[in-house]
Image: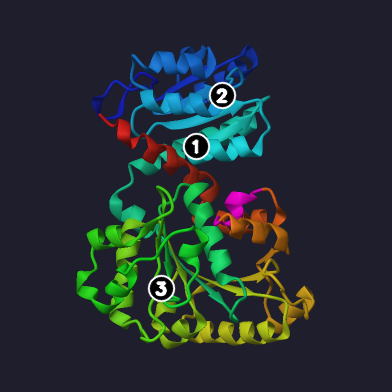
């Protein structure tokens, strides 16, 4: 398709680039030619020229902006958002090798940020990811629904850090990859998911489980706590004097409704709730078992693996060793642990008690407060592979959602 042709008869171009130097232009020219785009749509002037130009003409579907000459890249990206159409996929270039800037730009919704100088292979890969993002915007709703994921996080023993893992991984999915994410905390009396984000649990979750007929999309919208645009938490602090046993039909209905409005549903699932509701395993795409290096943990990991295998033989299971738990017991060597459970360990979260405590005092997840520490990077690695091509497809949805307010 030529660059000046629009899908559906509109006047939007397929591609435009605003670069700051001749070297970037020369790398882009063959990429444009490969995709049938005119090199004439590669302009100089960087993001400042992009903002000026797109204030008077429709934005292209795929937009490349160079931030190399920007004094405030975050502000310039915000200004760019004000002049772009809904669904614009943006690739940013820059010379600042700053991980905080990179995360901020991705959180604002751009598809990717490439560090200059550019190579044609890296640029070609980023362009293909942008094209996939554009294609995904046209997928039927039923295809998108099929791509949703439901994941339960279970601590093989109490106090082992399952909620810590669930909250941090959910935050990464929502804020780094732009996925609509729901976190359902089924520890109804003692859950800590809301506390992690400094939120006050309401009565919505208890109402939903006691009155399943009330559960619909509007009820879910009102009952969930909002950490941000993409992360919703459904949690409770039920009275200790009133034992609350979730009705299986109510719980199943609630999870279905959360799926309807989310790309990913995380369930912080206590062991006893899992054992009392084994049908839940059949509704999952993945089970994360969180363990530590204690003898009891090795024993119970093996037992739960057997239970999951019998209950849902095709269920994908990941074993996570969480060494970040304060006072974690290292009674077993990781190799011996893997030998005991008769399967490899999938992820290890290293010990970093100081950062975990400091993040808790700030009422923030570790991955938000201290994204560069090794424990946070390990948690981000767990999140990366949850959705298909999460490191590419997840990023694309953020800008599209952020830009939707500009739809005309």
Secondary element under disc 3, as helix, strand or loop, is loop
Residue at figure coordinates x 43%, y 24% from the top left = 80
Which part of the image, by quadrant, shows the N terminus? Answer: top left
Residue matched to label 1: 111
Secondary structure found at label 2? loop
Nearer to us of marks 1 and 3 is: 3
The residue pinned by badge 3 equals 237
Marks 2 and 3 sit apart, C-alpha to C-alpha, by: 43 Å
Q: Position of residue 394 (x, y in %)?
A: 48, 47
Give above or below for 298 relative to 143: below
Q: On screen, 172 above or below 340?
A: above
Residue 24 image position (x, y, % from top left) = 61, 19
Disc 2 target residue: 72
Instruction: Locate residue 6 relative to residue 312 in the image: left or right.
Output: left
How far from the left and from the top, in percent, is residue 198?
A: 48, 58
Name the residue nearer the viewer: 238 or 399.
Answer: 238
User: Contact, CB < 8 Å: mark 1 with mark 3?
Assistant: no
Above-or-below relation of 154 to 142: below
């Amino acid at each position: 398709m030529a660059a000046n042709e629009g899908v559906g008869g509109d006047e939007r171009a397929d591609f435009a680039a605003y670069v700051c130097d001749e070297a970037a232009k020369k790398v882009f020219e063959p990429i444009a030619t490969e995709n049938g785009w005119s090199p004439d749509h590669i302009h100089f002037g960087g993001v400042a020229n992009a903002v000026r130009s797109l204030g008077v003409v429709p934005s292209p579907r795929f937009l490349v902006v160079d931030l190399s000459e920007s004094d405030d890249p975050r502000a310039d990206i915000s200004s760019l958002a004000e002049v772009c159409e809904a669904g614009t996929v943006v690739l940013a270039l820059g010379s600042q090798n700053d991980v905080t800037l990179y995360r901020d730009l991705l959180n604002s919704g751009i598809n990717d940020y490439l560090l200059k100088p550019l190579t044609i292979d890296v640029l070609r890969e980023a362009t293909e990811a942008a094209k996939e993002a554009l294609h995904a915007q046209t997928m039927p709703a039923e295809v998108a629904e099929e791509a949703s994921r439901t994941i339960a996080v279970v601590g093989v023993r109490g106090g082992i850090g399952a909620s810590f893992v669930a909250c941090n991984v959910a935050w990464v999915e929502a804020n780094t990859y732009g996925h609509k994410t729901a976190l359902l905390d089924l520890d109804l009396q003692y859950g800590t998911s809301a506390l992690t984000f400094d939120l006050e649990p309401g009565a919505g979750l208890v109402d939903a489980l006691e009155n399943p007929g009330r559960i619909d999309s509007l009820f879910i919208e009102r009952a969930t706590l909002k950490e941000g645009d993409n992360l919703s938490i459904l949690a409770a602090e039920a009275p200790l004097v009133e034992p609350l046993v979730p009705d299986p039909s109510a719980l199943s209905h609630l999870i279905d409704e959360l799926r309807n409005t989310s790309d990913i549903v995380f369930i912080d699932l206590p062991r006893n709730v899992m054992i009392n509701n084994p049908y839940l395993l059949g509704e999952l795409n993945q089970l994360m078992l969180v363990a530590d290096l204690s003898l009891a943990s090795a024993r119970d990991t093996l037992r739960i693996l057997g239970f999951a295998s019998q209950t849902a033989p095709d269920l994908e299971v990941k074993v996570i060793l969480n060494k970040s738990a304060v006072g974690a017991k290292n009674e077993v060597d990781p190799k011996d642990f893997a030998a005991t459970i008769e399967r490899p360990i999938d992820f290890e979260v290293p010990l970093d008690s100081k950062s975990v405590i400091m993040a808790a005092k700030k009422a923030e997840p570790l991955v938000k407060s201290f994204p560069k520490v090794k424990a946070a990077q390990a948690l981000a690695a767990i999140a990366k592979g949850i959705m298909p091509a999460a490191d590419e497809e997840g990023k694309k949805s953020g800008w599209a959602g952020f830009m939707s307010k500009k739809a005309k």
